[in-house]
Image (tube, rainbow, N blue to C red):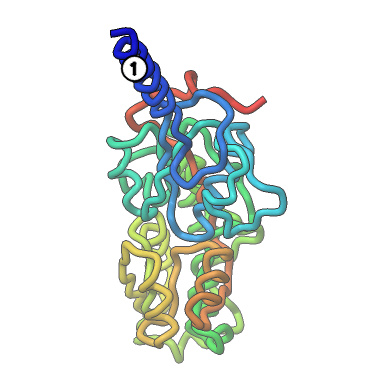
Amino acid sequence: MKNKLIAVSLAAILALTAAALGGCGSGKDAGGGKSGNNVTIAVPNDATNEARALMLLEANGYIKLKDGVSITATVRDIEDSNGIEFEEVEAAQIPNTLKDVDFGIINSNYAIDAGKNPVKDSLIIEGSAAEYANVLAVKEGNEKTDKTKALVAALKSKEVVDFINEEYNGAVVSVVESPTDGYDADVNYDSLAGQTIKVAASPAPHAEILAVAKDILAKKNITLDIVEFTDYVQPNNVVDGGELDANYFQHQPYLDDFNKQNGTKVVSVAAIHNEPMGLYAGKTSSLDGVTKLK
């Protein structure tokens, strides 16, 4: 009987120990956490935006990345996850994932598409980092064509700058320092009359901004055909393949990484605006219960 009681006691102790350990799992793909945070954050799974999201969390004291990590850092480069778990999700799908996670870090264009105001609705948000300015890009070799120069002048116009500043209230920020009147004196607009410029773009805010440029070009009898895409791959492929003249949906680090990974030759010709990335509430409405690293 004594041996049976000892065996039962040992079994009970082991069961309790296993239960305790089971509640202390580290975050998915994350480095060793030291605190008791029990939250899950969805981050973009593409190379540059994932690093950008993680750097936003580090800058606000919630995680620690390994020294020397680059713009292509992933959750595997986290030194201290602070007990936070991460879900790597396609950037466009993170708004739809918020119901299943505590928080999500979302690019402003996707936040706007989901009906959110990045300035008012985000719990933390990036500053205006110039390296993440969204660019107009064309196939290498087409940087100096009249089509390209006419489109650049229209997108860098005072009319477009004013539209961005007034329409988005800081959720999208123009980076154009010297706005044009909408036109380039070196372009032969008569030769472009009757022609069409085809541009791949994300629905918001890129296609909305291009709509302003479309009206400017229309005054010179040039048609701007805005072709909307909801992914981050096809817009570069169709420009590299010559199907469309340009695209407007990405920042420079993403474009550089895309060319490196895919052997494409798409180059930026103008930086137009910046979209601060932000962290949004999901199942948890506030960061008050999430401790920062000491």
In the figure, 278 relative to 138: above or below?
above
Q: Nearer the viewer, residue 226 or 261?
A: 261
Residue 197 visible, this angle: no
The residue depicted at 36 percent of the width and 55 percent of the height is 90
Q: Position of residue 204 (x, y in %)?
A: 36, 55
Image quadrant where one finds the N terminus? top left
The residue depicted at 35 percent of the width and 86 percent of the height is 194
Q: Nearer the viewer, residue 46 or 143?
A: 46
Q: Position of residue 147 (x, y in %)?
A: 48, 83
Label 1 element class: helix
Would residue 224 be found to the left or right of residue 252 on screen? left
Image quadrant where one finds the C terminus? top right
Q: What residue is pinned by disc 1?
A: 7
The residue depicted at 56 percent of the width and 66 percent of the height is 181
Q: Position of residue 188 (x, y in %)?
A: 52, 88
| Quarter residue 3 falls in | top left
Q: Position of residue 145 (x, y in %)?
A: 53, 87
**Which amino acid type corresponds to the residue marked 1 in the rendered image?**
Ala
